[in-house]
């Protein structure tokens, strides 16, 4: 049994981090937080606008600050953006402050789930499949390195994946409410 104050979801765009995270938090009676949403609220601009004006580096700085701020708290299910694992300090912080679940999904399923999404700057290209494969090549080893648990969400609805995850967590994760 792994003791940690928060439950953290990592994985690529379209893995279901936000939809599963929200449901899981409700089921476990915990608060839900979304790192992307926190960046948008703290900056007062959409992710697209942040990328446009400050570039990816500007977004990553804000993402890092939002994670630091959120992970100072306890008792949350936190969904992170697909690139949060790129930064070594983020990985270290997440490992210290949470039980990390990697929601794994194939590029094919990502393409289906993300459809014509216009809110993800890294996908605004004609060769979306290639973009997702390039991101996966770099990030998959990082997701695996930080993960305490891997859940394949391929072919699962968000509610089925939430149920499966809740059952797994029962014997794997114990919320440690004291560490702050
Ligand atoms: C990103 C994923 C997005 C968001 C931003 C960058 C990435 O979050 O943080 O567009 O680098 O993969 P989701 O994984 O929630 O879509």
Image (cartoon, rainbow, N blue to C red):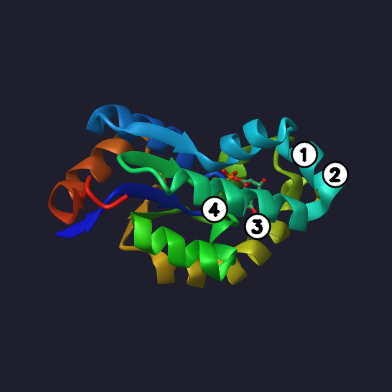
Label disc, if present, on residue 52 of the rendered structure: 2
Q: Which residue is pictured at 39% across the width and 49% down the height? A: 8
Quarter of the N terminus within the rendering: bottom left
Question: Percent x, y for residue 50?
Answer: 78, 42
Rendered image quadrant of residue 76? top left
Quote the CA–CA distance across marks 1 and 4. Answer: 17 Å
Residue 97 % position (x, y): 36, 56
Contact, mark 2 vs mark 1 (Cβ under 8 Å): yes
Give percent across and percent down for residue 172.
18, 55
In front of the other: 172 or 89:
89
Q: Pointer 4: what residue?
A: 12
* Horizontal side, residue 176 vs residue 21: left or right: left
Q: Mark 2 near mark 4, Cβ–Cβ under 8 Å?
A: no
Give the Cα distance between marks 2 and 4. Answer: 21 Å
Label 4 to label 3: alpha-carbon separation: 9 Å
The residue labelled by disc 3 is 132
The residues tagged by marks 2 and 1 sit, at their Cα atoms, a distance apart of 6 Å
The correct choice, above or below, for 53 with respect to 19 in the image is: below
Q: State whether residue 102 is above or below residue 178.
A: below
SS category of the residue bearing label 4: loop
Residue bearing mark 1? 48
């Amino acid at each position: 049994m792994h003791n940690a104050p928060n439950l953290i979801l990592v994985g690529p765009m379209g893995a279901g981090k936000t939809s599963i995270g929200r449901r899981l938090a409700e089921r476990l009676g915990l608060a839900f937080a979304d790192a992307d949403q926190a960046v948008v609220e703290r900056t007062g601009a959409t992710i697209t606008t942040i990328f446009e004006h400050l570039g990816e580096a500007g977004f990553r700085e804000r993402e890092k600050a939002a994670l630091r701020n959120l992970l100072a708290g306890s008792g949350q299910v936190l969904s992170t953006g697909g690139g949060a694992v790129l930064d070594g300090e983020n990985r270290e912080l997440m490992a210290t402050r949470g039980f990390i679940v990697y929601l794994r999904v194939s590029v094919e399923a990502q393409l289906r789930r993300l459809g014509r999404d216009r809110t993800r700057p890294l996908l605004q290209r004609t060769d979306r499949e290639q973009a997702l494969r390039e991101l996966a090549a770099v990030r998959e080893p990082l997701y695996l390195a930080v993960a305490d648990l891997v859940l394949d969400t391929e072919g699962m609805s968000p509610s089925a994946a939430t149920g499966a995850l809740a059952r797994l967590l029962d014997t794997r994760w114990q919320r440690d409410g004291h560490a702050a």
